[in-house]
Amino acid sequence: SQQPLPICLNIQLYDASCLCEPTMQTANNWYQEGLLRSPGFDFTFVIGIAAIAIATGFLVTDRPELFAPILALDLWLLGYHHVISTYTRLIFDTESFREHKSLVLYLPVVVAAAVTALALSAGLWPLATIYLYWQWFHYTRQSEGISKAYGGKSAGKDLGNLRVARLAFYAVPLAGILHVSARNPADFLTMPLKTLPVPAWLLVAVDMLAVIAVVAWLGYQLRAWTRGRLALPYLLYMLSHFAIFSVAYIWLSNISYGWLTVNIWHNAQYILFVWLFNNRRFGGIVDDKHAVLSILSQNGRFPLYILACLTISTAVYFLIDHFGVDAVGTWIGVPTAVATIVIYQTINFHHYIVDSLIWKLRKNSLRSKLGLA
């Protein structure tokens, strides 16, 4: 049979590049339990990305002059690419396009009209404010989906009390965004910003709730460890989640620097997760109906996949920056800077809506392709 084994039965050890051809079967090794793919891939996915993101946040805080060039690299290598990765699930083959036709053709028009109307009627600050809170929620939701994927890979392990885990999972990001709101920054990524007022008592209460919830969650993890049923990859992912949101939104006082931290983490995770999905979707088989995507998604072809997506994203955003911005600015009668924000926020908001619809782990087809229980 050419049908691939489920991911939970087909765990293999990959070389240090994480994404090359399998070299040997090691399904019984304890360190393979609960992984999405392999030790190298999951170490990069959970530890490596978070470490780089946090280090970048501290670097630009210490060296503010590096913020602009690092932001440019983040947008080019990760941000634009991560948006294009979404379209590998929407338009890289006719089957996907038919399934998501309304999201590709009609939704962008609706979002663009709403963003343009808001910018023309109220100015830029509403777009910045909506973006601040929506990106926080979007990043948190993506992280929750990934944590559920690790939970789904931890069959036979003790994840602890799931209600406590969920409370801790959301309490830390909530405390983070409340700290940002309480600081009331005047601008965000050069855009004027207004934040929700946060009374001091509420900030203290949510901080205490987050601490208590995380400590309680750690207690359940300690119990699982003493019983020999600790889900280590799940534990490490949850800790990386807490660390990222604590550093980006609480520790770093400059919201733009904090945003850069969480944005690097989010973008890099998304790119790897989409590739993993496509890789598992085709299971080593080149599908004639999805020729391009299935070829790019095979083991050992991750660099080729990245190059293809990066080439497309560079071309698309080059056209947007050099032709689209001027055209939109002329059409709606606004300066270039305003037109740029309108276009990019349209892309961001459309991406957020699409992601909320196509990555629901409750869908059996998605879970089966990821090998989740």
Image (cartoon, rainbow, N blue to C red):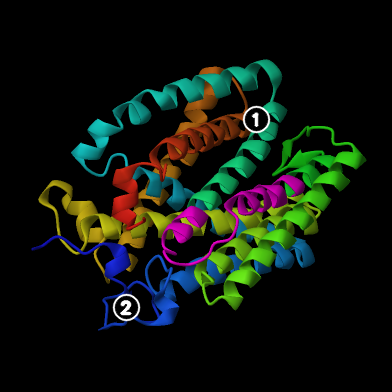
Residue 7 point in image, percent of width and height: 30, 64
Q: In the rendered image, which residue does mark 2 sit on?
A: 27
Foreground tag (1 vs 2):
2
Q: Secondary structure at mark 1?
A: helix
Where residue 183 appears, x then y in whole percent? Answer: 85, 44
- Residue 301 in view here: no
Q: Is residue 183 above or below residue 13?
A: above
What's the magenta bit mostly, secondary-structure-wise? Answer: helix
Confirm whether residue 106 shows in the render: yes
Q: Is residue 174 magenta?
A: yes
Return the residue found at the far front: 227
Which portion, as a residue range, is magenta? 146-175
Instruction: Say whether marks 1 and 2 touch (CB < 8 Å).
Output: no
Mark 1 or mark 2, earlier in chain: 2
Q: Position of residue 68 (x, y in %)?
A: 66, 56
Label 1, on which residue?
127
User: In which quadrant is the C terminus drawn?
Assistant: bottom left
